[in-house]
Every structure is written in structure tokens, then in C-alpha cells.
Image: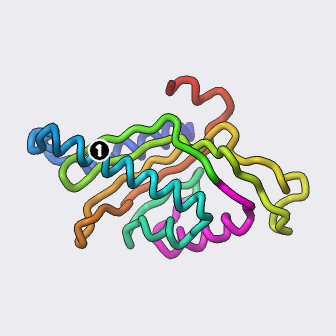
Amino acid sequence: MKRIVSVAVTVLTLAACAAPDGAQDSELTAGQLAALADTFQMEGEKFSQGLADLDGPAIAGLFAEELIYFDNGNIYPSRARIDEIATGFFDRLERLEGHWEPSNVLVLGPDAGVFWGVFHADDANWNDSEANPPEQRGQALWEDGYSWTLVYQRSAHGGFEVTHAHQSSLPPGRLDQYK
């Protein structure tokens, strides 16, 4: 049931961002589509760099002031709340470096697009913080990957910012269906 709700929310978000009557692709040349796709891929890389730097404010800075962020059933409605949650999470880690595999980009138009990827933590461990249960300390995290969907919209300043995001952990064996 959670998967159905997650897919429904993502599809509805994509539909809401798309231009009416499918016009989003017809107004862009192949070169413009490729450039936008590259931009959204780079935006996904900025997100993973914020993870690697364990930098809550950097992650939060990628988001619009008004947003919806779903995290395994939790909803965070503001950039300030993302900063608070990310910083608290990062305080419990020694390091968090990894890569996207697979990842995909969908250009919705000149002012919107989607980055989706499964982040695999190549080098990530919980630290010895009292906030971590003893059996978790020093253990690796996200061994099966962690999935993010990031919906971008052009900001008033001309760059792109995340207006909707969804993340969820992947149960073992589920990633094979995406390869």
C-alpha cells in the first residue's frame, strides 16, 4: 500500500508540473532538452555532494522556501525543517559518500524537471553518538540503496530549486527491477 501511495504522489506531482496538452517538449529543441537534462543531472550531483559533506544547510539551500518533502512517510513542509532534520541526521554519521545508480532525468519543460536516483553509500557509517543505538554504531547504512525523487522548478533568480521531493529506503532485492 505504501508503494502505491508513493507512486501516486509522484505521478500526481509530475502531472501538476507538466505544461498543458503535452506542450513541454514541443517548445524545446533537442539541444535545449539535452542542456536541461544535463542541468538536472548536475542538480542531483549537488544533492549527493551535500550528503557527502554532511551539510544540512547546503542540502536545505537546494530547496524552495515552499515545498513538500516526503521521507518514508514523514512530511516536511519547509526549508527550515529540512535543515533541522538533515543536520540532526548528519550529526549521527561519521561519513556519507556514495553514488547514484541508477539515475534518470525527465525534462518537463523549460522551467521544470525531475531527477530520480538510487543513492548507494560507498563509504558511510553511523558514529559513536549517544543518539545511535549501541548495535548501530560503526555500522554501514543504506547498503541496499536509498531512492530520491527531486522535482525542480526555475526560481525567480533564474536557477532551479527543489519544490517537491520524495525519499524512501529500498528493501533488499527491489533494486533489481530497475536495472
Residue 176 located left or right of residue 142: left
Q: Quadrant of the N terminus?
A: top right
Q: Is residue 36 above or below residue 179?
A: below
State which region is magenta: 75-96
Q: Amino acid at mark 1?
A: Ala
For the image shown, how many numbered marks are present on the structure?
1
Q: Residue at left 26%, top 44%?
A: 107
Residue 137 rendering spot, x and y as whole percentages:
85, 56
Please rate how many residues cluster around mark 1, counting C-alpha atoms within 10 Å: few if below 14, some from 14 to 19, many from 20.
Answer: many
Residue 62 painted magenta: no
Residue 59 located left or right of residue 132: left
* Residue located beneath label 1 in the image: 37
The one of 59 and 20 positioned closer to us in this rendering:
59
Residue 80 rendering spot, x and y as whole percentages:
50, 76
Residue 90 painted magenta: yes
Q: Residue at left 58%, top 68%?
A: 55
Residue 50 rendering spot, x and y as whole percentages:
53, 62
The one of 167 and 39 positioned closer to us in this rendering:
39
Q: Is residue 152 above or below residue 76?
A: above
Give the residue furthest to the left.
Answer: 27
Give the residue furthest to the right.
Answer: 134
Secondary structure beneath label 1: helix
Residue 151 located left or right of residue 74: left
